[in-house]
Amino acid sequence: MQLTVAIIGGPHGLKGELRLDVRTDSPERRLAVGATLETDPPELGPLTVERTRSLKGSMYVIFKECHDRTVAEALGGTKLTIETDEQEDNEEDAWYPHELVGLEVLDPEGYTLGEVISLEPMPGQDLLVVREPDGLIARVPFVRDIVTDVDLNDHCVIVDAPPGLFSEDEMILDQPDEPGDQP
């Protein structure tokens, strides 16, 4: 199965160095010097890592096939992918995005909140993108306090959502008592 390791960003300097938007938990292994990565679109690769470095929280790479800014600019937006066997990374509480897409999203009582349509990687934590039954889109922080369970066997995700995370008609707001409601 093809998995995205990183997405190539813009060039850095004149000698082909590129900034990467890393999408793997183990960049030191997946993007090691000498690693050859397939690309999406395929006609731009494969690319072989010649050198990497980190600067201010970002990862930069030079590929053996890219030593000038013109080639680097042409690679912007390209996905770096690898062929992997899902069984090799058998970490508990870790899922591939394709495993999450299509899962039903339920609240702790079992009521349907929607369906996972994608996963958005973010700096702090990933976000589950959920299409609610009414078609609205909710972005759910993928943290244990909110996403309490992912059950691939039952094809569902349990979300203990704070008020306001899903559409307004799901929220119950405390209303002040009407005058005259008091005895």
Image (cartoon, helix red, strand yellow):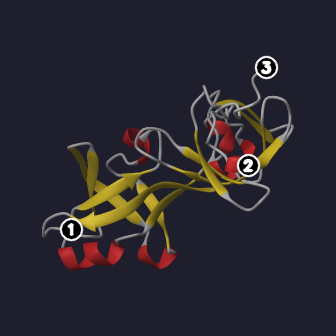
- Kindly indicate whether the residue at mark 1 contacts the one at mark 3 (C-beta within 8 angstroms): no
Residue 110 bears which disc, if any?
A: none
How dense is the environment of label 3, judged by Cα within 10 Å: few (below 14), some, or many (20 and up)?
A: few
Rendered view: 96 above or below 181 = below
The residue drawn where x is 87% and y is 38% is 154
**Is label 3 or label 1 in front?**
3
Rendered view: 99 above or below 2 = above
Amino acid residing under circle 1: Gly
Residue 183 bears which disc, if any?
A: 3
How dense is the environment of label 1, judged by Cα within 10 Å: few (below 14), some, or many (20 and up)?
A: many
Rendered view: 77 above or below 25 = below
Q: Which secondary structure lies at badge 3?
A: loop
Residue 169 bears which disc, if any?
A: 2
Residue 167 visible, this angle: no
Q: Nearer the viewer, residue 103 or 135?
A: 135
- Rendering coords of residue 33 (x, y %): 31, 48
For the residues marked 3 and 1, what is the alpha-carbon distance in whole angstroms? Answer: 78 Å
The residue drawn where x is 35% and y is 73% is 75
Label 1 sits on residue: 16
